């Protein structure tokens, strides 16, 4: 469902951040993405959620070659991908509820169809009583949970989580990991970029490691 | 979400709600951030544009209607001027002219104006003329044609001239065609001004939309990343600009209506303008609604096209 072949990536005219990256993710798989800070984990995820184009190589998402994907096809592909951004990227002028409901709203669905689902999910991640709060009034961990809720609310086929447990206590971290594992069991492919060794060790999932721009695979 | 949004606030009174509509403090309803200062400025500019458009449009309506009125009034009528002549008494000139007119097919009515009538006509131009009783005034015969009559004017003029010296036929044609030409120029001028106002409004809205997209870059990008098509973003932005357009258009219209009422009022007082300005008639006012409607439409479309163009150029 995700296939990279000899992918290189750079920002503008800068140096190559990623070199000759090749891997593929099977449907229903769960992987971790690790590597030192600044190694290029977020950059790799950007390629996957179609926010950046590779400078060379082939990327195929759900069987679509991203190089030949038209702009009109992007929304359809992106709706199949849920992203937890490292810096959350919640919209400040919307409430927590509205932020989390956003992926459903942009599909043009009626709010009455999804309101209950969104509220249930928010309750599940412990934000049941913060639904009408603005993101800036949430704690870091609460924002993180809101970001996770927004990523999974559309039941994506692929979930990309960038440091999803960076701002929560270990207990909440384990709870969120269980959410990801649960989603994975329901068929979602999951890729979690993290520094959190405890998270990796707790799950026995295979690991993609980026170091010096190169990617290695560890089972 | 909006109900819960306002649930912890004291509900606004109808008056301040109405004020909010004009000033732009309506509760946020869209995905795009509320447009605070830029929005207020834009509403002001759109209001000014809409005001000017209403004036130009009102002038066009007034001039067109006046031209039609003049045409209708003058086409069915003739005036015969009877100039005082040394060899013949005015009464004889008049009866000779009336005799000719009696003979012509298609004339409904012909009557000489009394001296008082003529003085009343001249008063506005010469001032009170009571002291100049001895000033020789031309006599006038007012002729009304039957509707649809086809009178040979040049032949009539010849016959009148032959009947007695000092008789002249005035068909108003010359005057009317000059008046109509002036009215046509005024209408074209109004159309030119309206075009200019439209182009200016489009330019301002395009600029404001670009600024708004740039300022809300993060929101737009997040919308895209969660799977929003360009259409969705365009709809959000255009709804916002529709609101601004309606607000600006309505304020401009309100100001223009006050202006027209003032003109009508001053006009009826008399002497405010060189010509008696009829102002707008009650039946003209509904036409003015076209202005805010087209302003809002222009604003919305310009915003939509701009969003789709700008986004289309992104990766
Ligand atoms: N927008 C950008 N423009 C230019 N360079 C960038 C940009 N974003 C990241 N970089 C550079 O690319 C490299 C990889 O950054 P990236 O954010 O992918 O690292 P990361 O592995 O996610 O790090 P961290 O664990 O700290 O989040 C870094 O050297 C960074 O400076
Ligand atoms: Mg990162």
Image: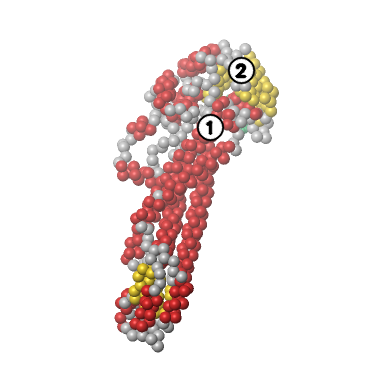
What crowding class fits label 1: few (fewer than 14 Cα within 10 Å), some (14-19), or many (20 or more)? many
Do the CB atoms of the residues marked 1 and 2 lie less than 8 Å apart? no
Q: Position of residue B128 (x, y in %)?
A: 32, 78
Q: Secondary structure at mark 1?
A: loop
Q: Quadrant of ligand 1?
A: top right
Which of the labelled discs sits on residue A25, or is there none? Answer: 2
Q: Position of residue B3 (x, y in %)?
A: 36, 32
In screen coordinates, is B118 left or right of B185? left
Residue in the image at 33% along x and 85% along y: B134
Residue toward you, B231 or B13? B231
Residue A128 sits in which quadrant? top left
B109, above or below A166, in the image? below
B288, above or below A86, in the image? below
Q: Secondary structure at mark 2?
A: strand
Residue B87 sits in which quadrant? bottom left
- Whether disc 1's CB lies below 8 Å from ligand 1 is answered no
A44, above or below B57, in the image? above
Task: Look at mark 1 in the image and give the residue it sits on.
Answer: B229
């Amino acid at each position: 469902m995700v296939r990279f072949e000899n992918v290189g990536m750079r920002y503008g005219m800068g140096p190559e951040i990623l070199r000759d990256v090749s891997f593929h993710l099977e449907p229903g798989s769960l992987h971790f993405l690790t590597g030192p800070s600044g190694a290029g984990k977020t950059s790799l995820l950007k390629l996957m959620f179609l926010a950046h184009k590779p400078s060379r190589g082939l990327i195929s998402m759900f069987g679509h070659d991203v190089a030949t994907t038209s702009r009109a096809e992007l929304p359809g592909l992106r709706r199949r991908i849920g992203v937890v951004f490292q810096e959350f990227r919640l919209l400040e002028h919307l409430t927590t509820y509205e932020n989390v409901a956003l992926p459903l709203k942009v599909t043009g669905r009626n709010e009455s169809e999804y309101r209950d689902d969104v509220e249930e999910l928010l309750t599940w991640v412990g934000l049941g009583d913060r639904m009408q709060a603005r993101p800036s009034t949430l704690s870091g961990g609460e924002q993180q949970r809101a970001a996770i809720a927004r990523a999974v609310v559309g039941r994506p086929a692929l979930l990309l989580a960038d440091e999803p447990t960076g701002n929560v206590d270990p207990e909440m971290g384990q709870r969120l990991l269980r959410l990801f594992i649960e989603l994975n069991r329901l068929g979602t492919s999951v890729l979690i970029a993290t520094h959190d060794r405890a998270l990796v060790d707790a799950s026995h999932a295979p690991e993609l490691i980026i170091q010096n721009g190169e990617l290695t695979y560890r089972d | 979400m909006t109900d819960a949004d306002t649930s912890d606030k004291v509900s606004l009174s109808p008056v301040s709600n109405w004020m909010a509509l004009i000033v732009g403090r309506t509760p946020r309803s869209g995905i795009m951030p509320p447009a605070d200062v830029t929005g207020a400025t834009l509403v002001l500019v759109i209001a000014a544009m809409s005001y000017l458009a209403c004036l130009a449009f009102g002038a066009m309506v007034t001039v067109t209607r006046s031209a039609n009125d003049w045409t209708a009034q003058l086409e069915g009528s003739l005036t015969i001027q009877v100039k005082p002549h040394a060899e013949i008494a005015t009464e004889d000139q008049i009866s000779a002219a009336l005799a000719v007119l009696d003979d012509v097919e298609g004339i409904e009515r012909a009557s000489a104006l009394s001296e008082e009538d003529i003085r009343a006509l001249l008063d506005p131009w010469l001032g009170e003329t009571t002291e100049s009783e001895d000033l020789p005034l031309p006599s006038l015969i007012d002729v009304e044609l039957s509707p649809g009559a086809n009178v040979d004017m040049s032949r009539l003029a010849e016959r009148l001239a032959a009947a007695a010296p000092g008789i002249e036929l005035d068909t108003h044609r010359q005057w009317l065609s000059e008046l109509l030409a002036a009215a046509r120029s005024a209408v074209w001028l109004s159309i030119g001004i309206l075009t200019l106002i439209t182009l200016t409004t489009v330019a301002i809205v395009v600029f404001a939309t670009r600024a708004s997209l740039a300022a809300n870059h993060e929101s737009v990008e997040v919308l895209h990343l969660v799977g929003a098509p360009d259409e969705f973003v365009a709809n959000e932005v255009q709804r916002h600009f529709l609101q601004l357009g309606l607000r600006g258009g309505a304020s401009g219209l309100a100001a223009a209506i006050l202006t027209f009422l003032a003109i009508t009022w001053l006009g009826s007082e008399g002497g405010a303008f060189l010509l008696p300005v009829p102002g707008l008639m009650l039946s003209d006012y509904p036409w003015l609604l076209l202005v805010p409607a087209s302003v809002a439409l222009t604003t919305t479309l310009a915003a939509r096209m701009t969003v789709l163009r700008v986004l289309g150029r992104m990766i």
